[in-house]
């Protein structure tokens, strides 16, 4: 059964969530295609179950699930005048079923409810498909930056102003 055949629910991380190993596996599996493609390697490779749990104390997390199966996640960090969208991940077996769009829609609702009108994210220079996908969702490139130690741009910053 594919994600398209399942009833997918998108909700904020529930109180008492304790499936950190599963959430870590979801992120690592979703980001695995980047290995050997982007330089420097994804910060996802430095994640642990423990620092994921810690991160949720400072960030809002939305999960996409079908029954008990974790299909996707997104982390949202509050900044001075916008929300930063990070670690948007969809299980490879569930990609193409609209889960990423659903997670971003939840982030947009959350931003509006919080009185914020701007979302920002970064994607890597090499991931032109991601740049196009975010562009189709209303994000526009605002900057290109370099990771420490690099003399060339390694990341594309994109913003979306909510209507």
Image (cartoon, rainbow, N blue to C red):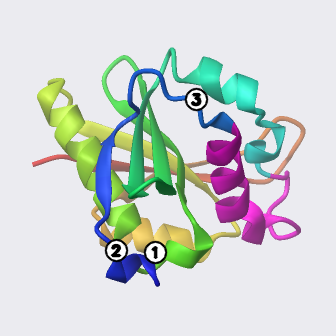
Q: Which of 17 and 39 is in front in this view?
A: 17
Q: Position of residue 90 (x, y in %)?
A: 52, 63
Q: Nearer the viewer, residue 113 or 80?
A: 113
At x 78%, y 33%, the residue is: 48
Q: Mark 1 or 3 closer to N-term?
A: 3
Tag count = 3
Can residue 130 be seen in the rendering of this structure? yes
Q: Where is residue 19 in the image (x, y as percent from the top left)?
A: 60, 37
Q: In this view, does 79 lie above or below 12?
A: above
Q: Does the magenta stretch include residue 97?
A: no
Q: Where is residue 25 in the image (x, y as percent from the top left)?
A: 71, 52
Would you say 122 lies left or right of 42 here? Answer: left
Q: Where is residue 107 in the image (x, y as percent from the top left)?
A: 29, 43
Asked if disc 3 and disc 2 are in contact, CB closer than 8 Å, the reply is no
Residue bearing mark 3: 18
The span shown in magenta is 21-41
Q: Is residue 148 above or below residue 80?
A: below
Residue bearing mark 1: 132
- Describe the element under mark 2 as helix, strand or loop: loop
Residue bearing mark 2: 6
Q: Mark 3 or 2 closer to N-term?
A: 2
């Amino acid at each position: 059964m594919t994600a398209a055949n399942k009833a997918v629910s998108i909700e904020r991380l529930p109180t008492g969530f304790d499936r950190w190993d599963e959430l870590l596996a979801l992120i690592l599996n979703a980001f695995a295609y980047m290995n050997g493609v982007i330089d420097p390697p994804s910060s996802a490779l430095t994640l642990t179950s423990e620092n994921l749990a810690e991160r949720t104390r400072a960030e809002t997390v939305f999960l996409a699930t079908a029954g008990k199966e974790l299909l996707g996640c997104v982390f949202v960090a509050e900044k001075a005048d916008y929300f930063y969208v990070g670690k948007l991940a969809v299980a490879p077996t569930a990609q193409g079923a609209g889960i990423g769009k659903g997670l971003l829609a939840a982030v947009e609702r959350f931003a509006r409810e919080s009185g914020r009108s701007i979302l920002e994210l970064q994607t890597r220079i090499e991931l032109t498909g991601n740049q196009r996908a975010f562009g189709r969702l209303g994000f526009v490139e605002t900057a290109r930056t370099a990771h420490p130690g690099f003399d060339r741009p390694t990341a594309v910053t994109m913003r979306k102003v909510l209507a």
